[in-house]
Image: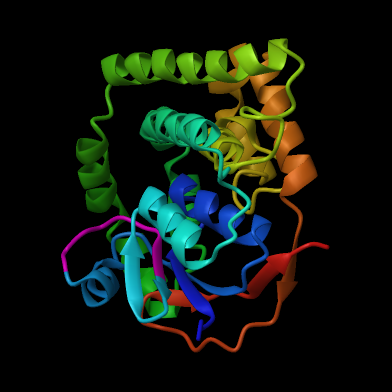
């Protein structure tokens, strides 16, 4: 017997948005528990048995799955039929190849984003990191923001040279989308919506700022990121991401009964819009 799933996330994590979207698009019920960056580490240790900082983490059927690709492959096996991955071997290989390509671009999008925000709007980063924190965890993170942001900069390798390199890789990802768009294709593989489309759109969301995103649709965020992305605003890849979000990212929010955990706020259970 299957049980309702728990998904541990960060609000602004592109990996978390990817899996939220996959679950919503597949019509699978789950409880999302948003953790607070840095202060989530004890919870990750408890869930995964290892001191690994990454989210999302899925709990389902007595198992714990970490890493967005592993979660997708787990869903393909344990929640079959899973329409977001084709059953045709060639199309499946093409979808998973693109999923991996856009996953590779994801950290470079994040690096480019934070290179701008931490330099120009550090108070906005602090607000985004604490938006789901409880009273005391939020206060702790705000007090420790300066040293934590320094550690984060070092971990991300933030520098002008690294940011320039990341922007080149972002443009390659946009080129991949535009090759499909130039052939009048609405979707990247096989004329149907798949995890390839979700991954591409979710990974580029911090730059495109689609209306449907819970963080990157904020006006203050859009204003902060606008100078960095202005050179890309007219690209077909940006229009494609907006279109994918507009057509496929509308979900109902249903009240959750999930109790809070340390350093986290429970979110509402989600189900796909009919």
Horizontally, residue 213 falls left or right of residue 103, namely: right
Residue visible at 60% across and 60% down in the picture: 81
Where residue 87 appears, as percent x and y from the top left, is 56, 45
Above or below: residue 216 compared with residue 94: below
**185 and 92: which one is in front?**
92
Magenta region: which residues? 50-58
Residue 24 shows up from this direction? yes
Above or below: residue 30 compared with residue 82: below
Where residue 217 appears, as percent x and y from the top left, is 67, 44
Name the residue at the front extreme.
Answer: 88
Where residue 218 appears, as percent x and y from the top left, is 66, 46
Horizontally, residue 113 falls left or right of residue 141, namely: right
Above or below: residue 206 compared with residue 43: above
Residue 10 shows up from this direction? no
Magenta stretch mostly in which secondary structure? loop
**112 and 103: which one is in front?**
103
Q: Is residue 55 magenta?
A: yes
Where residue 166 appears, as percent x and y from the top left, is 37, 20
Residue visible at 48% across and 45% down in the picture: 14
**Quarter of the view holding residue 206:** top right
The C terminus, quarter of image: bottom right
Residue visible at 27% across and 60% down in the picture: 144
Q: How many marks?
A: 0
Name the residue at the left extreme.
Answer: 50
**Quarter of the view holding residue 238:** top right
Colour option used: rainbow
Above or below: residue 78 compared with residue 179: below
């Amino acid at each position: 017997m299957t049980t309702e799933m728990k998904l541990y996330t960060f609000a602004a994590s592109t990996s978390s948005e990817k899996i939220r979207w996959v679950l919503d698009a597949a019509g699978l019920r789950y409880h999302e528990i948003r953790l607070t960056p840095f202060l989530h580490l004890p919870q990750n240790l408890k869930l995964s048995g290892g001191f690994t900082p990454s989210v999302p983490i899925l709990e389902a059927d007595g198992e714990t799955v970490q890493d967005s690709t592993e979660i997708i492959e787990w869903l393909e096996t344990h929640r079959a039929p899973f329409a977001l991955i084709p059953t045709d071997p060639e199309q499946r290989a093409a979808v998973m190849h693109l999923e991996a390509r856009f996953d590779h671009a994801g950290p470079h999008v994040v690096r480019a984003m934070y290179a701008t925000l931490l330099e120009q709007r550090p108070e906005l980063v602090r607000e985004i990191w604490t938006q789901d924190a409880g009273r005391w965890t939020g206060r702790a993170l705000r007090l420790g923001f300066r040293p934590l942001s320094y550690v984060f900069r070092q971990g991300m390798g933030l520098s002008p040279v690294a940011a320039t390199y990341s922007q080149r890789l972002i443009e390659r990802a946009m080129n991949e989308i535009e090759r499909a768009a130039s052939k009048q294709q609405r979707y990247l593989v096989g004329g149907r919506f798949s995890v390839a489309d979700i991954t591409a759109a979710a990974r580029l969301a911090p730059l495109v700022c689609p209306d449907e995103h819970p963080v990157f649709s904020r006006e203050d965020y859009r204003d902060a990121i606008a100078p960095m992305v202005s050179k890309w605003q007219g690209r077909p890849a940006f229009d494609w991401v907006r279109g994918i979000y507009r057509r496929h990212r509308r979900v109902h929010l249903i009240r959750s009964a999930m109790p809070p955990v340390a350093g986290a706020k429970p979110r509402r259970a989600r189900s796909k819009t009919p």
